[in-house]
Image (tube, grey):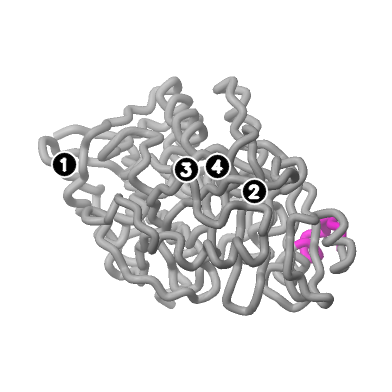
Amino acid sequence: MLRTDVAVIGTGAIGAAATWRLAERGVDVTAFERFAPGHPFGSSHGDTRLFREACLEHPDLVAMAQSSRALFRELERLSGDELLTITGGVSIGAEDSDAVAGAVRAAETAGLDIEHLSAAEVRSRFPQHADLADTDVAVLDPAAGIARPERTVRAAAAAASARGAHIVTGTTVTAVEPGSSGVTIRTADAVWTADRVIIAAGAWLPAFAPWLDLTPVRTPLTWFTPRDAGFDIADYPVTIRQVDAGTVMWGHGSIDGSLVKLGLGDLWGTERPRIDPDAVDRGVTPADWSRLSPLVERVLPGLAPVPTRVEPCMITISPDDQFVIGASPESDRVLVAGGDSGHAFKHCLALGEVLARDAVGEAHELELDFVRPARFTR
């Protein structure tokens, strides 16, 4: 039987971050990964993820984004790689839309410096957008940008390994069994014990925590070819556009003079079938862009409406679209980390720090009640 102080299951965005932050503290930590850090089979791939400071999903996410940004900069110093690029960002929609009102609420609560634009100003500064209503407005978030998921995960794993963490790749954890004196972790060829375990298994988390009402779904990542000028990221920065109550499009301009990344929002009640992450369809068909292409043709006519590049991805949705980070109600030796709900990557390094503090019993600087599992079990 093998022994470690803290075990981490999964080295995607949150798991790799937690492993790094534990190793920074000198904790004996072992992480288990069924593939390898930076793999394309989960939720932390696809070249880029949006980073926003005025987080429309919850005002308390502002401080989490700020904490994560500081850790991005620390990890950049350690890795020598660019992981977070600030481009500025814009949220467009009706004044009372989730995209605009949520960003304003977050900014006002945290005292952020944002800029408000009228419909006429949006048309002038962002002429790529068509079919804007005269009542549409926009909010500029100067701290928005893009994060690099594969680079970040690999950098966090490398930093963790350099500080003594043991990362076991190509290994699937088959069981987690908490007891009064520790936790048993079983794989196909070994049995480990740990004082605590962090389960950051992404779309596989529901199998370990069936008491959580988490729904893994398949979501395509799509990139489009410009047919007009004005789609470099300097001209078309990080953007969230709420076209109507049920339709949100997100994306950013080209970072290499080529393709524009766009997607449909997942945070406003879109119903999609639950998937088995071990049996997810990794092929692509026109169904993957059937909803998005007509919208692109309508509101961004400067782009070819059929995507040039498509990759399948998975996200795991929680009942309230907020993350689930903290102790299991079944055992305080088991910490769960998931429910990304399509907006966790920007916060992943801060979430790793939260989990590290949880594991070693340190106090927290962030407000966390809104992401704790206890909100579902009170």
Q: Do callouts 4 and 2 mark residues in contact (Cβ within 8 Å)? A: yes
Q: Which residues are magenta?
A: 107-116
Which tag is nearer the camera, tag 1 or tag 2? 2
- Between residue 156 and residue 92, name the one nearer to us: 92
Q: Is residue 199 left or right of residue 355?
A: left
Secondary structure under badge 4? loop
Pinpoint residue 119: horizontal percent, then vertical percent: 85, 68
Question: Badge 2: few (under 14), some or many (20 or more) residues near its Cα, within 10 Å?
Answer: many
Circle 4 crowding by C-alpha within 10 Å: few under 14, some 14–19, many from 20: many
Q: Is residue 341 above or below residue 255?
A: below
Mark 1–mark 2 Cα distance, whole angstroms, equals 40 Å
Q: Quadrant of residue 16?
A: top left
Q: Quadrant of the C terminus?
A: bottom left
Which of disc 2 and disc 4 is earlier in sequence? Answer: 4
Residue at screen point 43% across, 65% down: 317
- Give the CA distance from mark 4 to mark 2: 9 Å
Q: Quadrant of residue 240?
A: bottom right
Between the residue at mark 3 and the residue at mark 1, the CA separation in whole angstroms equals 29 Å
Asked if residue 134 lies left or right of residue 371, the reply is right
Q: Amino acid at mark 3?
A: Gly
Question: Residue tagged by mark 3?
Answer: 46
Residue located beneath label 2 in the image: 252
Pointer 1 residue: 187
Tell me if 106 is positioned left or right of 203 in this view.
right
Give the SS element for disc 3.
loop
**What residue is disc 4 on?**
48
Q: Are marks 4 and 3 in contact (CB under 8 Å)?
A: yes
